[in-house]
Image: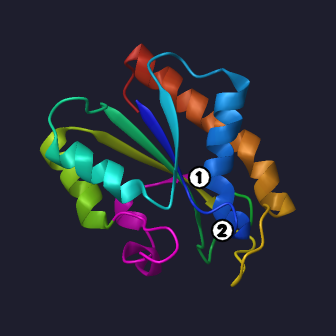
Amino acid sequence: MVIFGCGNLLMGDDGFGPTVVEALTASSVLPPEAEAVDAMTGIREYLFDYLLCEEGRPRHIIILDAVDFADRQPGEVFLIDSSAIPAQKIHDFSLHQFPTVNLLHELEQHTGIEVTIVAAQAEYIPAEIEPGLSPSMAAAVPRACELIMSILSTQLRGDPR
């Protein structure tokens, strides 16, 4: 299983994914079957590799990212289905380079890789460089870690979701 933290640490709450990966690796709580990767803004390259290569594919990918949903509260951590990715994120290749929905669907359908997206509602993503998470997103980091550990535990027991 591979956990990918997506985002840019220099752009406020956009650094949520990499910050969660840092917390997971610093705490040494990940089971040996799981790897956490700070993908920054380059997750597409990893996903293309998994799509094109048959060897070394994980059975489950967890993607961590900050999102902007109108109906969520800043710092709220939740799971989203790839079909629920907001339209403005689907083709956003400038900041996150988040994978297209088609790429995620192809991974699931053609490789059997399970994809889970753990999202957190951003409070503030600046227009210019401004490192550091907002207080609500900093508080979301341990909640995201707990959710990921729960997902991993369920997967390792072989329980259906």
Above-or-below relation of 156 to 160: above
* Amino acid beneath label 2: Arg
93 vs 102, nearest the viewer: 93
Residue annotated with mark 1: 78
In the displayed structure image, the side of residue 19 where residue 112 appears, left or right: left
Residue annotated with mark 2: 72
Residue 26 lies in what quarter of the image?
Answer: top right
Above-or-below relation of 138 to 3: below
Q: Quadrant of the C terminus?
A: top left
Q: Quadrant of the N terminus?
A: top left
Crowding at mark 2 (Cα within 10 Å: few <14, some 14-19, many 20+): some
> Residue at the spot x=80%, y=62% of the render?
132
Mark closest to the chain's N terminus, 2 or 1: 2
Instruction: Tell me where the magenta segment starts and ends, as one range.
Output: 78-99
Q: Are marks 2 and 1 in contact (CB under 8 Å)?
A: yes
Question: In the rendered structure, does residue 96 fall within the stretch colored magenta?
Answer: yes
Between the residue at mark 2 and the residue at mark 1, the CA separation in whole angstroms equals 9 Å
Considering the numbered disc 2 on the image, is that residue within a helix, a strand or a loop?
A: loop
Q: Residue 123, percent across and down? A: 75, 71
> Residue at the spot x=43%, y=58% of the render?
42
Q: Residue 21, percent across and down? A: 62, 41
Q: Residue 111, percent across and down? A: 17, 41
Crowding at mark 1 (Cα within 10 Å: few <14, some 14-19, many 20+): some
